[in-house]
Amino acid sequence: MIYFKYLRMVVKSMLQYRANLVLLTIGQLLSVAGYFAGIALLFARFGSLDGWSFGEVALCFGVVTAAWSLTECFARGFDVFQSTVRRGEFDRVLLRPRGTILQILGGNFEFTRLAKLLWAFAVLGVGVTQSGVEWSALRGLTLALMVLSGFLIFSGVFILGASVCFWTVEGLEFINIFTDGGRELAAYPLTIYTRWIRRFFTFILPFGCFNYLPLLYVTGRSANGLYALTPLFALAFLLPCLLMWRSGVRHYQSTGN
């Protein structure tokens, strides 16, 4: 499959600069470790966060970090798509007999972000052991769906930001509010925020659907089994993102470079 050929080529190119790869990986590990250490110190001082225990917040943080790491690794091409349009390189994408989404996905991988993913799994391990959850097959499946749907939702936001470039050439900085800002916000249970923030990040940008609502079921804070299915809303969110991308491709005009 051509996608895996893209992966193989990127891995080979990265291995040509092993020292750079190692340093970047260490940097990614330290950045996430430092952030989570701050959360641990917060709980060491105050004990809980709006009634949520350290283990429960570790689950929340681990899910978001894992989803974000996967997105940065495999959907990075959409995050830096503005440079592709500005340099006129999207013309070559259109000339190739492959889908544009596949080519953008395959054209840019950030494997150093997988270091964050390893750390996210370590944090999830802390959450699994210290949250006090009585784990079952359904709860374990829900946790896996949370990570996968988070990856799809973050990727959808990346695609939306990239689609804007077809009309503006430059990406819009406010998209970072929903990527970097949304990641920071979703790392904690939504109950600590005001009502309008909870509603916006549940019904407009469905971060709460992949993290907060299923977390209520996983931790036993709600007996509503439907919360275990809310990660599936990621598919409903991804569809309009892909439609906007297709509309942008149809309206694309070359920069002439």
Image (spheres, helix red, strand yellow):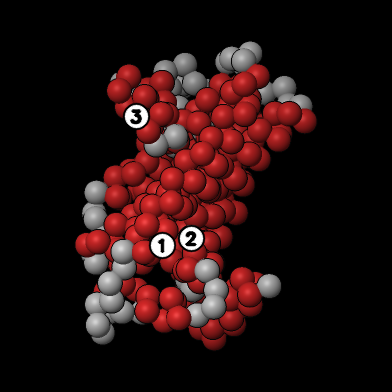
Image quadrant in which you'd find residue 215 = top right
State the residue lying farthest toward the front.
Answer: 250
Residue with the mark numbered 3:
200
Q: In whole angstroms, how far apart are the C-alphas of marks 3 and 2?
A: 24 Å
On screen, residue 181 versus residue 115, left or right, reads left
Q: Which quadrant: the C terminus?
A: bottom left
Q: In whole angstroms, how far apart are the C-alphas of marks 2 and 1?
A: 6 Å
Amino acid under disc 1: Phe
* Helix, strand or loop under label 1: helix
Would you say residue 204 is visible in this rendering?
A: yes
Residue with the mark numbered 2:
75
Of 43 and 66, the residue lying toward us = 66
Would you say residue 132 is visible in this rendering?
A: no
State the residue lying farthest toward the top.
Answer: 223
Check if mark 2's residue and mark 1's residue have beta carbons within 8 Å.
yes
Q: Looking at the image, which residue is at 57% across and 15% down?
A: 221
Query: x, y (%) of residue 133?
Result: 67, 23
- Mark 3 and mark 2 lie on one chain; the one further toward the N terminus is 2
Q: In whole angstroms, how far apart are the C-alphas of marks 3 and 1?
A: 23 Å
| Label ID, residue 78 | 1
Image quadrant in which you'd find residue 190 = top left
Local crowd size for mark 1, using a 10 Å CA cut-off: few (<14), some (14–19), many (≥20) = many
On screen, residue 239 versus residue 42, left or right, reads right
* Helix, strand or loop under label 2: loop
* Helix, strand or loop under label 3: helix
Residue 63, above or below 131: below
